[in-house]
Amino acid sequence: MSEFDYDLFVIGAGSGGVRAARNAAATGARVAVAEDRYLGGTCVNVGCVPKKLYSYAAHFHEAFEDAGGFGWRLPAAPEFDWATLRDNKIGEIKRLNGIYGRLLDNAGVRLINGRAKVLDPHHVSVAGETVSAEKILVAVGGWPWVPDFPGKELTVDSNRVFDLDAFPERFLVLGGGYIAVEFASIFNGLGSDTHLVYRGELFLRGFDREVREFTRDEMAKKGVNLHFETNIEAIEKVEGGLKVTLTNGETLEVDAVLAATGRRPHLEGLGLDQFDLATNPDGSLAVNERFETSIPSLLALGDVTGGPELTPVALAEAMQMVAHHFGDTTPEPLDYSRIATAVFCHPNIGTVGLSEEQARERYGAIRVYTEDFRPMKHTLSGSSERCLMKLIVDDESDVVVGAHMVGEEAGEVIQGIAIAVRAGLTKAQFDQTVGIHPTGAEEFVTMRTPARR
Ligand SMILES: Cc1cc2nc3c(=O)[nH]c(=O)nc-3n(C[C@H](O)[C@H](O)[C@H](O)COP(=O)(O)OP(=O)(O)OC[C@H]3O[C@@H](n4cnc5c(N)ncnc54)[C@H](O)[C@@H]3O)c2cc1C
């Protein structure tokens, strides 16, 4: 009989924590999990899920406009009701919270509602109880971070933006990451007069340059007011709204400001400061390939370890951790390259593998294939939205090392292409694939002439 209450104590019932708890329990391990806010973590409650639901809501705007060219006459100009969207979203998330609770319960995992604190490498205190465990998994995720400026307290962060009391007719997003561009598209689509303010020269740093520029142009066409190379100097309350002064001297009056200025590991009050654990340069917890911190009984995974901050990554890490610590065989190390990802701005971005800039740096010679076209749907809809597709090929091996798309359902399309890129298929094999007609995605197998080398 083990000297500990549990084999594994998980702190945080988010994407990584729940998957780790369930999978460990399935091997026969005795598992408990502590959660102090919401089952399902960031993704379910204030991340992927509500964000995608709001993105769907925002797309209806265009759908109504596009419908006219196909013969549909709407009886009156459609009106958007924020409270209906928000409250339906709340109902759906409650349903998902219940599912997560049942998943843990059915797996035989004990759930303790409360904020956990690590007392020593084998003890945790939570909800007035001290619990011992052979291994403690820190899966606490991240938390929004906002820089200091006068009026910072008047902003909302991505945790709060979903539940605003009133719909902001005038909306400003500060930031240039994927969360910022997604919310700018969402509120623009829902009907807000929307501004995006970013201190850099172009948003979505790290993505393919052509993709970033194309997205900038498409978002601007849809009416998002983009302000680059400037920042918020101050925000003050004025009659009927918020006055935002930018560092370039411009002032804007809006109803809400979303600070989408980054996320930090959620380590406050967790009790880890006492250990002097090794960290990465960004303050996230450093782990080895078994997901052990510098104290081997303290494990960590997901956003708190500073890898790609994506739910499927947290899930993969959880399964990998369980295989290492509770499985019979040592798994191959996780391969973090060629992880596909989407940005749900409008139009969507889907991407896998290297950007053109990264490929140029890594390989001696590359071929770049691009298609920039008006999708068939928009021949009748009248919309000026365009679609970009792009393949990047290592010239020597002919392997497709990057695939990018900006256009409707880009995430859905790139998920399929990602399998081919991950499998290391060549451009010749892409070319041998007979396309599906008429689709936009068929362009990925019909691009024959390089746009440049
Ligand atoms: C606005 C937004 C949109 C996103 N969109 C996407 C997307 O489209 N696709 C995608 O793949 N990813 C997306 N993400 C990222 C994704 O949500 C995260 O990568 C994922 O949730 C990380 O999982 P995790 O298990 O590391 O942490 P989390 O899911 O954040 O879970 C951590 C949990 O730990 C709990 N906790 C923290 N401290 C304690 C404590 N001391 N005691 C008890 N419980 C504690 C928290 O309450 C939380 O429930 C988005 C994130 C945001 C913010």
Image (cartoon, rainbow, N blue to C red):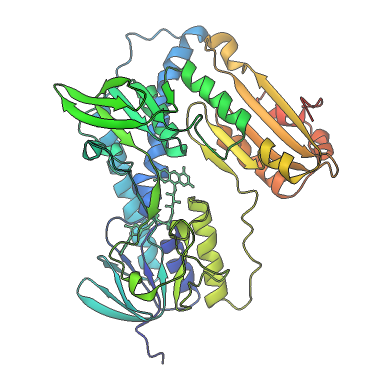
Residue drawn at the location 75% of the way across and 31% of the way down: 368
Q: Up-down: is 306 above or below 58?
A: below
Q: Report x, y in % for residue 133.
A: 37, 81
- Give the camera-side residue of 105 and 207: 207
- Give the camera-side residue of 57 and 396: 396
> Quick check: can you spot residue 13?
yes
Residue drawn at the location 32% of the way across and 49% of the way down: 95
* Residue found at the very far left of the displayed protein: 239
Q: Report x, y in % for residue 283.
A: 43, 59
Quarter of the figure that contains the C terminus: top right
> Quick check: can you spot residue 436?
no
Answer with left or right where residue 65 lies relative to residue 440. Answer: left
Number of labels in the image equals 0
Residue drawn at the location 73% of the way across and 46% of the way down: 362
Answer with left or right where residue 248 lies relative to residue 447. Answer: left
| The quarter of the displayed image where residue 240 is located | top left
| The quarter of the displayed image where residue 106 is located | bottom left
Q: Report x, y in % for residue 330.
A: 63, 74
| The quarter of the displayed image where residue 190 is located | top left
Q: Report x, y in % for residue 321.
A: 53, 69
Quarter of the figure that contains the N terminus: bottom left
